[in-house]
Image: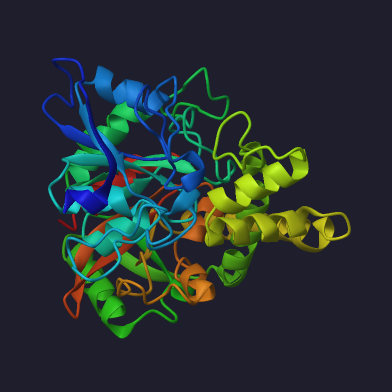
Amino acid sequence: MSDDIFITEATIDGESDGPLAGKQVAIKDNISTDGVKTTCGSKMLADYVPPYDATVVERITDAGGTIVGKTNMDEFGMGTTTEMSYFGPTDNPAAPGHVPGGSSGGSAAAVAAGAADLALGSDTGGSIRCPAAFCGVVGIKPTYGLVSRYGLVAYANSLEQIGPIAGTVEDAATLLEVIAGVDERDGTTRDPPQGDVAYSDAADGNVDGLSIGIPTELLEGAEDGVVDAFWDGIEQLESQGATTHDVSLPSVEHAVEAYYVIAMSEASSNLARFDGVRYGHSGGFDGNWNETFAAGRAEGFGDEVKRRILLGTYALSAGYHDKYYKKAQNARAWVKQDFDSALEEADVLASPTMPVTPFELGESLDDPLQMYLADANTVPVNLADLPAISVPVGDADGLPVGMQLVGPAFGERQLIRAGSALE
């Protein structure tokens, strides 16, 4: 099983004691590890060995965690199924024959298969929460700026966050506790306003008096079995003293298109650095630099990455910037406003994490739009820079279903408390 979970199996020993002592941690292969290959699931970086550790890797080993390998992922984080990896797909240990979700599918599969106790993923539009839901494990997408991105190979800087995947809410909270906080090497990081990162203490399951808002738009279009499992989870929370009411997020109707314009635009800029000269797959110099760059990128990038670079470059081009990118940023502001309004009426918001159950392997490869639309419930959270957790709430036709809980900025403790009540 571990053959398709890890791109590189390697042991990086941690300190002898600390909150993660004795824990095995898998790292998504777009997070730098000193002396250990970091490929981003791409032929472009198939042989790239970073000369430094990401901040989160340093914090894990300092806390006693042992890193056991670099996990498979959709190339450069672009995908929802982990089938976009140059190294082949990962099977879902919780639902063999189905995708594990993406892009952090290898990390979620490592936890679900018992190949690691904990894992790190990165979440640009749901890439931690989707595989957590599909693999029946817990995933946390932290508030933007809570966790350092130093050492994360950039896809879309304004959207992505590194976060934990684990078998229980408390274990995920413990890993978040270790990696959270200001990093002088990442100017976007900050400590929570209340200064409290003792997240594992919050996993006490006490939801008495908790107000839960249910965005009706995030239930529309979801599979019947997914909706049934979601309501079972809501009943479980209500039986423990939580109250629920409907809220509306009208802007989410446009969130997916706004997200993909912004993410693809940032990707086209970020991936321009892979030219085969400084690092990356080389096209072999034949006397013409332009043809050399083009050959290296044509051979080094997969189809989905090329699609997103082309669309992003188009959206940013002269004459189209205002028509697409500027409109997408306006839509992003609207999404953020809607979430802030909804969270004035509720402590947390709840929805199915994914509107569908895990696809069969190969099922979505011919239809990129189907894959993009599957992110409808997760991408709005990244646009709004808010934290969210995905917790298992049963199954539909034997396939795992997750519930997503969304909180206000730096409201991780509230999400961990509510998520632990579902276990």
In the foreground, 58 or 29: 29
Q: In the picture provided, is 90 more to the left or to the right than 155?
A: left
Point out the residue furthest to the bottom here: 224
Q: Quadrant of the C terminus?
A: bottom left
Residue drawn at point x = 16 percent, y = 40 percent: 117
Residue 91 appears in the rendering: yes
Q: In the picture provided, is 268 more to the left or to the right than 9?
A: right
Q: In the picture provided, is 234 more to the left or to the right than 301?
A: left
From the top left corner, tell me how far across and down residue 8 is, in percent.
Answer: 29, 38
Q: Is residue 232 above or below residue 88?
A: below
Residue drawn at point x = 30 percent, y = 66 percent: 99
How was this image coloured? Answer: rainbow
Number of dots carrying numbers:
0
Q: In the picture provided, is 23 more to the left or to the right than 234?
A: left
From the top left corner, tell me how far across and down residue 88 is, in percent.
Answer: 35, 57
From the top left corner, tell me how far across and down residue 419 is, in percent.
Answer: 25, 53
Point out the residue furthest to the right here: 319
From the top left corner, tell me how far across and down residue 284 is, in percent.
Answer: 62, 39
Q: Is residue 155 above or below residue 315?
A: above
In the foreground, 14 or 286: 286
Point out the residue furthest to the front here: 286
In the foreground, 216 or 167: 167
Residue drawn at point x = 17 percent, y = 47 percent: 168
Q: Is residue 182 above or below residue 212?
A: above
Q: Is residue 239 above or below residue 18?
A: below
Residue 342 appears in the rendering: no
Residue drawn at point x = 26 percent, y = 70 percent: 98
Q: Quadrant of the N terminus?
A: bottom left
